[in-house]
């Protein structure tokens, strides 16, 4: 597609539930990044994929968070046993390769845990 | 520990005047710096960047200055326009070895 697509745009879930957030990167972009933006904060890095593999998952806050990119294109961020503190905007970005040049962000998924 | 700091959460400027947004960093390994602009309910969009081998980069109304010895950069917008009202994020990169590190952002309001 023309840009990075994230679905859903909004998600409200109950505490303790499981959620999946989807990211469709720009076609041909090999690098894909997940960030989380809490209120009043800048985007905080979660995980980075180069192709199908997670090249850096050092930003995942705990083992409730997991992400996959099985075919090197679409990625899914999975959050188990959601907590109210997980409420944030989850941003996905893709780029042609590793490196800062060419990051294109999606509009994000606003997750609210009630 | 915040590696990229934007100490001013907000800035208000009159239309036509200069807007100056500041950013400091602590990691001396950073060698590429970017500014992103974010409107509500949209993702950040790239605005302008600068490599550490330069001290200035200009693109139309936007100029970024880098002072490596002070680990400081600034974004100048002149003349400011109401459409520039947004949140501006400073971001830094380490030769592509690590994902971008962002500051907390500065909300710019340009008043007509």
Image (tube, coloured by chain):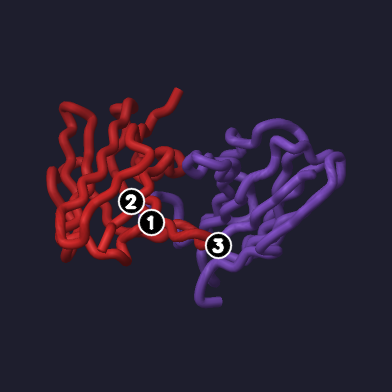
| Residue nearer the viewer, A48 or A70 | A48
Q: Are marks 1 and 3 on the same chain?
A: no
On the picture, is B36 further left or further right than B18?
Answer: right
* Chain of the residue on which disc 2 is drawn: B
Q: Residues within 10 Å of mark 3 (few under 14, many from 20)?
A: many
Residue A104, image x, y percentages? 46, 61
Q: Are marks 3 and 2 on the same chain?
A: no
The relative height of residue B107 versus residue A102 in the rendered view (above or below) is above
Residue lying at the far front of the rendered structure = B112
Which residue is labeled 2 in the image?
B108
Which residue is labeled 3 in the image?
A107
Whole-number angstrom distance, CA of label 1 to CA of label 3: 15 Å
Q: Residue at x 38, y 39 (%)?
A: B9
* Chain of the residue on which disc 1 is drawn: B
Secondary-structure class at tag 3: loop
In the rendered image of this protein, which colour is used for chain B? red
Q: Residues within 10 Å of mark 2 (few under 14, many from 20)?
A: many
Residue B86, disc: 1
Is residue A82 something one can see in this rendering? yes
The relative height of residue B60 versus residue A1 in the rendered view (above or below) is above
Tell me which chain appears purple.
A
Secondary-structure class at tag 2: strand
Q: Residue at x 45, y 39 (%)?
A: B98
Q: Quadrant of residue A96?
A: bottom left
* Chain of the residue on which disc 3 is drawn: A
Q: Nearer the viewer, mark 1 or mark 3?
A: 1
Whole-number angstrom distance, CA of label 3 to CA of label 2: 20 Å
């Amino acid at each position: 597609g023309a840009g990075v697509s994230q679905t859903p745009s909004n998600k409200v879930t109950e505490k303790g539930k499981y959620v999946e957030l989807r990211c469709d990167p720009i076609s041909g972009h090999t690098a894909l990044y997940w960030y989380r933006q809490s209120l009043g904060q800048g985007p905080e890095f979660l995980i980075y994929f180069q192709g199908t593999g997670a090249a850096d998952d050092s930003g995942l806050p705990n083992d409730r968070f997991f992400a996959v990119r099985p075919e090197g294109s679409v990625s899914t961020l999975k959050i188990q046993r959601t907590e109210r503190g997980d409420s944030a905007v989850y941003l996905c970005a893709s780029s042609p390769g590793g490196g800062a040049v060419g990051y294109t962000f999606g509009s994000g998924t606003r997750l609210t845990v009630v | 520990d915040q590696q990229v700091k934007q100490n001013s959460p907000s800035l208000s400027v009159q239309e036509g005047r200069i807007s100056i947004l500041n950013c400091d960093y602590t990691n001396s390994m950073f060698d590429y710096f970017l500014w992103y602009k974010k409107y509500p309910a949209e993702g950040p969009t790239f605005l302008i960047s600068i490599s550490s081998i330069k001290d200035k980069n200009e693109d139309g109304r936007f100029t970024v200055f880098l002072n490596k010895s002070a680990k400081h950069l600034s974004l100048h917008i002149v003349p400011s326009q109401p459409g520039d009202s947004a949140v501006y994020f400073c971001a830094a990169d380490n030769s592509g070895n690590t994902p971008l590190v962002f500051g907390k952002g500065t909300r710019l309001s340009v008043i007509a």
